[in-house]
């Protein structure tokens, strides 16, 4: 991804730098050749060239670009589990990913970590974004996921004679686990996504208290992945599944729904981050009837919502790390609604706006392993900045309204928002002359 050249000055706003520190009033961010060169009071701003690009924050907020820490680029208006693998061909799914990626950027998300992707498309989506062919967030790819046979993501019965090959590797034992990771290594992913536990979506065979992988399988995944310098995460709701993942050496926990004190101690001991993805549960409960979800499924989501809220509070208050994001792409939880989760964590979970913004910026970058590049507004980091017309500390829900975005910058270049120009179409003429 090319960095902007020249100098950009963002002024007339409060700076929320993503570190958790209080906002700096009447402050300025200066970006030089795509990287931040100054953050601080307007009175201390260094001299800049007369031809500098100037962005007026309109008295609003200047904050780091947001990080979606559990991004499903290939999910698109999913109404039933079967839609995840057999509804569309890979060609159409590939087109949908570019639509979702651009939408995420327009929503202020300048970076994202994939939480699982059909056909390993996120590997190539990342390449297209980095080469400026597609507009989207800086991406960490995870590709196809791993689940044991008969587990949450293996729902096609044997008589259908079809598996879930586009979405997951179905494994039986440690040899299959190693084989699946090695296939992902060859395809260029960075995160290995697994399914240690079930979910409320599958109340009969694999509910949210069910274990879907053995500890031995999980350990084999971790050992193989770490050998190749990959990280491992997992869909963990059941308490014992969380503990198994932490003991196996997982680098992140998705959901972490039913944490007890032992699980919390294991998490804090290794400083493993968690991505709760609670808004998916809230949306499932509130909109489930409209989309025909069975009452037993809705009741399960209510239980995971209640448990997830308690666990998220427990983790943060104990000094643990939480990322924001997760599972967008369902009919009742569509792409574009990412910031609704931020509002939910402030208004219904009990986080402060500063805490939520830190989770959605600094911690998200840490989870991606790129905290030295972005996630906070600090000198030397990339100019990934979100400029918002409004005080997000007084009303976090402003972040849900893209019309309030003055500018979304990546590497100092304005990619979305009121000041953005249409994304250029790249055309290469390969005709022989």
Image (spheres, helix red, strand yellow):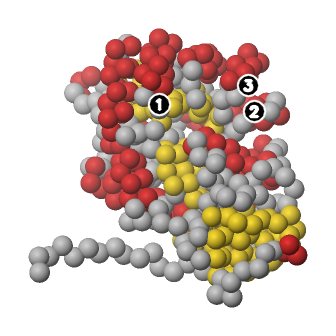
At 54% across and 50% down in the image, what residue appears?
A: 112
Question: Are dots 3 and 2 in contact, CB under 8 Å?
Answer: yes
Camera-nearest residue between 321 and 324:
321
Answer whether labels 1 and 2 touch (C-beta < 8 Å).
no
Residue ID for mark 1: 229
- Asked if residue 260 shows in the view, the reply is no
Whole-percent x, y for residue 147 in the image: 42, 25
Checking the image for residue 268, the label placed there is 3
- Residue 273 lies left or right of residue 327; in this view the side is right
Number of the front mark, 1 or 3: 1
Helix or strand or loop: what does disc 3 sit on?
Answer: helix
User: Where 166 falls versus 237 (above or below)?
Assistant: below
**At 83% from the left edge and 70% from the top edge, which residue is drawn?**
27
Whole-percent x, y for residue 124 in the image: 35, 51
Relative to 329, say whether 132 is above or below: below
Mark closer to the chain start, 1 or 3: 1
């Amino acid at each position: 991804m090319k960095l902007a050249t020249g100098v950009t000055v963002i002024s007339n706003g409060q700076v929320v730098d993503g570190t958790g520190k209080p906002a700096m009033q009447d402050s300025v961010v200066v970006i030089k050749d795509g990287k931040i060169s100054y953050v601080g009071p307007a009175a201390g701003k260094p001299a800049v060239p007369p031809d500098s690009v100037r962005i007026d924050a309109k008295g609003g907020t200047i904050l780091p670009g947001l990080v979606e820490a559990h991004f499903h680029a290939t999910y698109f208006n999913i109404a039933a589990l079967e839609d995840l693998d057999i509804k569309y061909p890979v060609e159409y799914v590939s087109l949908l990913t570019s639509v979702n990626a651009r939408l995420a950027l327009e929503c202020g998300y300048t970076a994202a970590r994939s939480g699982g992707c059909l056909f390993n498309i996120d590997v190539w989506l990342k390449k297209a974004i980095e080469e400026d062919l597609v507009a989207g967030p800086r991406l960490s790819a995870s590709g196809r996921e791993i689940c044991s046979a008969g587990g949450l993501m293996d729902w096609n019965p044997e008589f259908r004679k079809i598996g879930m090959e586009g979405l997951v590797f179905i494994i039986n034992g440690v040899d299959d686990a190693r084989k699946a990771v090695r296939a992902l290594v060859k395809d260029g992913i960075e995160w290995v996504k697994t399914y240690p536990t079930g979910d409320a979506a599958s109340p009969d065979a694999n509910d949210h208290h069910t274990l879907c992988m053995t500890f031995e399988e999980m350990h084999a995944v971790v050992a193989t992945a770490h050998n190749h310098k990959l990280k491992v995460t997992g869909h963990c709701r059941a308490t014992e599944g969380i503990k198994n993942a932490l003991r196996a050496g997982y680098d992140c926990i998705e959901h972490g729904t039913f944490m007890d004190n032992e699980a919390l101690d294991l998490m804090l001991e290794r400083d493993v981050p968690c991505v709760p993805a609670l808004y998916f549960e809230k949306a499932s409960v509130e909109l489930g009837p409209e989309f025909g979800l069975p009452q037993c499924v809705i009741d399960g989501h209510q239980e995971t919502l209640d448990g997830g809220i308690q666990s998220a509070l427990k983790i943060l208050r104990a000094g643990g790390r939480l990322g924001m994001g997760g599972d967008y792409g369902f009919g009742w939880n569509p792409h574009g609604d990412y910031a609704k989760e931020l509002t939910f964590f402030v208004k219904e979970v009990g986080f402060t706006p500063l805490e939520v913004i830190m989770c959605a910026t600094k911690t998200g970058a840490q989870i991606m392993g790129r905290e030295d590049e972005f996630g906070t507004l600090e000198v030397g980091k990339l100019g990934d900045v979100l400029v918002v017309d409004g005080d997000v500390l007084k009303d976090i829900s402003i972040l849900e309204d893209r019309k309030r975005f003055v500018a979304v910058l990546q590497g100092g270049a304005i990619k979305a928002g009121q000041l953005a120009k249409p994304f250029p179409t790249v055309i290469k003429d390969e005709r022989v002359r």
